[in-house]
Image: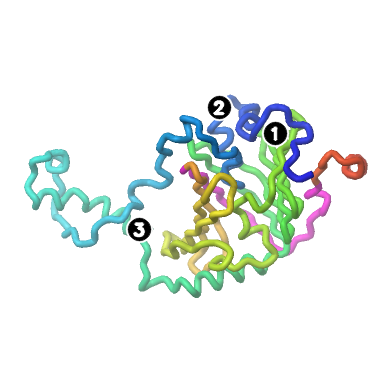
Amino acid sequence: MIGRRPRLAAGPLLVLAAALAVPAPAAAQGSFLDGLFGRKEEPAPAPAESEAPPPPAPAAKKPVPQSAKPAKETSAKAVGDRGASPKAATKAPDPAAKVAAVGAPLAQEVDASAVLTQANAYFNGITTLTGNFIQIGADGRRIGGKLTLAKPGRLRFDYDQPSPLEVVADGTSVAVKDRKLGTQDLYFISQTPLKFLLRDKIDLARDLTVSDVSNDPGGVRISLEDRSTLGGTSKIQLFFDAEAKTLSQWRITDPQGYQTTVQLSNLQKGRSVDGTAFFINYGRTEDKAMEKQIRAQ
């Protein structure tokens, strides 16, 4: 039954997302859900997907040679002059080097093993989690909502108006529902890059690939890769406070290179949550009866 689209006649997720109340390009609409669960369309040899994707990260994060000497002055003319002397050429990378250094890995100040241990303890200490989120799409569009989590595997995102979307995971599947159209798409939980939230027990270094542990303004950043998501490898960045005891946001770059940030606030652990919030109607007789019972409560 998993993977069916019981009432969906419009096709894959990007078509569903394009039906949102606020007019916007289909790619922009889809980016909201891509940031939570990764891009859903099956990879196909279409011309659009063969093109080089937009860069997933700002240029300031690219490695900058540390051997460049600081310059007292930086000439804009020297930067754009191809015939500039070697001495003048060394001045141009200086401002970028200063910017890049803010988020650059600082091995001498970060104990990667300790940070990972604390992050694992944070996730494994969660039984339920509630709070608010703001999702920032690859095109800069923002939308808020409420998050409800109950381990293992149950998760719900209720988007604020005007979005009609709900995302529900019941421990087996993930359903993307459109309240306005009365439709839903179903996906395997294993196809999503949110294992760090959904699994009862997680070991980031074992269950994902850790590519970097770095200092970040106000805290630490853990960079991961998940090769099991639908469509290819997703890159995940988790942002914590300095002691890795509070998750403040995550950033997911999907296999096509589109990046979405989800900022978290008002998180509360251990609160009682209603189990019916994670119900998914698969179209079976018993599901219909259960849905009717839930609505009557």
- Quarter of the figure that contains the N terminus: top right
State yes or no: discs 2 and 1 in contact (Cβ < 8 Å). Answer: no
Residue 159 located within the stretch drawn in magenta = no
Q: Name the kind of residue labelled 2 in the image.
A: Ala
Residue at point 44%, 74% (across, down): 111
Q: How is the image coloured?
A: rainbow
Q: Name the kind of residue labelled 3 in the image.
A: Val
Looking at the image, tell me whether mark 3 or mark 2 is earlier in sequence order: 2
Element carrying mark 2: loop
Q: CA distance from mark 3 to mark 2?
A: 34 Å
Residue at point 73%, 27% (across, down): 9
The residue singled out by tag 1 in the image is 164
**Within 10 angstroms of label 1, few (less than 14), some, or many (20 or more) residues?**
some
The residue singled out by tag 2 in the image is 24
Span shown in magenta: 257-279
Q: CA distance from mark 2 to mark 1?
A: 14 Å
In the image, residue 17 sits, relative to residue 271, either above or below, namely above
Q: Quadrant of residue 292?
A: top right
Q: Which residue is nearer to you in this view: 124 or 172?
A: 172
Q: Quadrant of residue 106?
A: bottom left
The residue singled out by tag 3 in the image is 102
- Quarter of the figure that contains the C terminus: top right
Q: Position of residue 128 (x, y in %)?
A: 72, 61
Q: Position of residue 211 (x, y in %)?
A: 45, 62
Residue at point 33%, 50% (across, down): 60
Q: Quadrant of residue 101?
A: bottom left
